Image: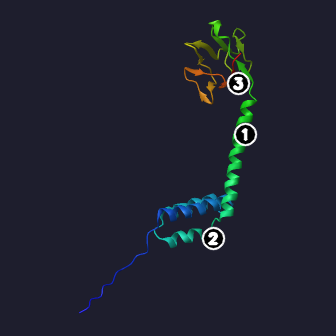
């Protein structure tokens, strides 16, 4: 007596590698302008929910699969784009006027603001009358915001209370930005 067994076979589930490949094809499709942003989002959601390889294949059927040449082109464009962003930041940073740190032996803090009585007068609408103070404490330079309206920043971060500053830091009082430099 021979018995026959029937097994129901289900298609294999999609692996993470297959899903990642499909998502990359979709990303490349957006980058090449073949998919709109909304279509990309919709297809990406479907790709993440896909259970079978044929579901993924349908999502990318109208898109060319990225060959080696297209990957090289997109990689080169990405590298150049990143370089131009870094270059633009560096160019902008170097064009800032220098603010010379006072001689460490003075012992008196340098007041900064619009008021003529300040040690450094900045006549700009975004600078408060008494905006900030730069002093030497324990061998370090400390920049203290004195309750200014438009704030004081060090390297793009707003100063709350006081912050230690060094030569080369970018500081801003309102919209007036400087690069700290030593004598």
Question: Observer-nearest residue: 96 or 49?
Answer: 96
Question: Observer-nearest residue: 135 or 30?
Answer: 135
167 relative to 110, above or below:
below
- 96 displayed left or right of 42: right
Please name the residue that numbered disc 2 is placed on.
62
Q: Residue at x 71, y 49 (%)?
A: 80
Please name the residue that numbered disc 3 is placed on.
178
Secondary structure beneath label 2: loop
Q: CA distance from mark 1 to mark 2?
A: 37 Å
Q: CA distance from mark 1 to mark 3?
A: 19 Å
| Residue 160 position within the rendered picture, expressed as x and y whole percent measured from the top left | 55, 23
Q: Residues within 10 Å of mark 3 (few under 14, many from 20)?
A: many
| Residue 57 position within the rendered picture, expressed as x and y whole percent measured from the top left | 55, 71
Residue 118 figure quarter: top right
Closer to us: mark 1 or mark 3? 1
Secondary structure beneath label 1: helix
Q: Is residue 123 visible?
A: yes
Please name the residue that numbered disc 1 is placed on.
87
- 94 displayed left or right of 57: right
| Residue 82 position within the rendered picture, expressed as x and y whole percent measured from the top left | 68, 46
Which badge, 1 or 3, comes first in the chain's sequence?
1
């Amino acid at each position: 007596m021979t018995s026959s067994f029937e097994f129901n076979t289900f298609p294999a589930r999609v692996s993470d590698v297959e899903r990642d490949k499909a998502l990359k094809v979709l990303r490349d499709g957006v980058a090449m302008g073949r998919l709109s942003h909304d279509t990309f989002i919709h297809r990406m959601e479907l790709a993440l929910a896909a259970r079978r390889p044929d579901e993924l294949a349908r999502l990318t059927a109208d898109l060319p699969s990225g060959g080696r040449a297209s990957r090289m082109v997109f990689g080169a464009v990405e590298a150049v784009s990143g370089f131009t962003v870094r270059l633009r930041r560096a160019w902008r940073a170097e064009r800032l006027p220098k603010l010379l740190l006072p001689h460490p032996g003075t012992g008196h803090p340098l007041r900064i603001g619009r008021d003529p009585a300040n040690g450094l007068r900045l006549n700009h609408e975004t600078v408060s009358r008494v905006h900030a103070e730069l002093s030497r404490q324990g061998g370090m330079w400390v920049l203290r915001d004195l309750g200014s309206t438009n704030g004081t920043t060090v390297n793009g971060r707003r100063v709350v209370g006081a912050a230690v500053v060094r030569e080369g830091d970018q500081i801003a009082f309102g919209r007036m930005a400087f690069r700290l430099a030593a004598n």
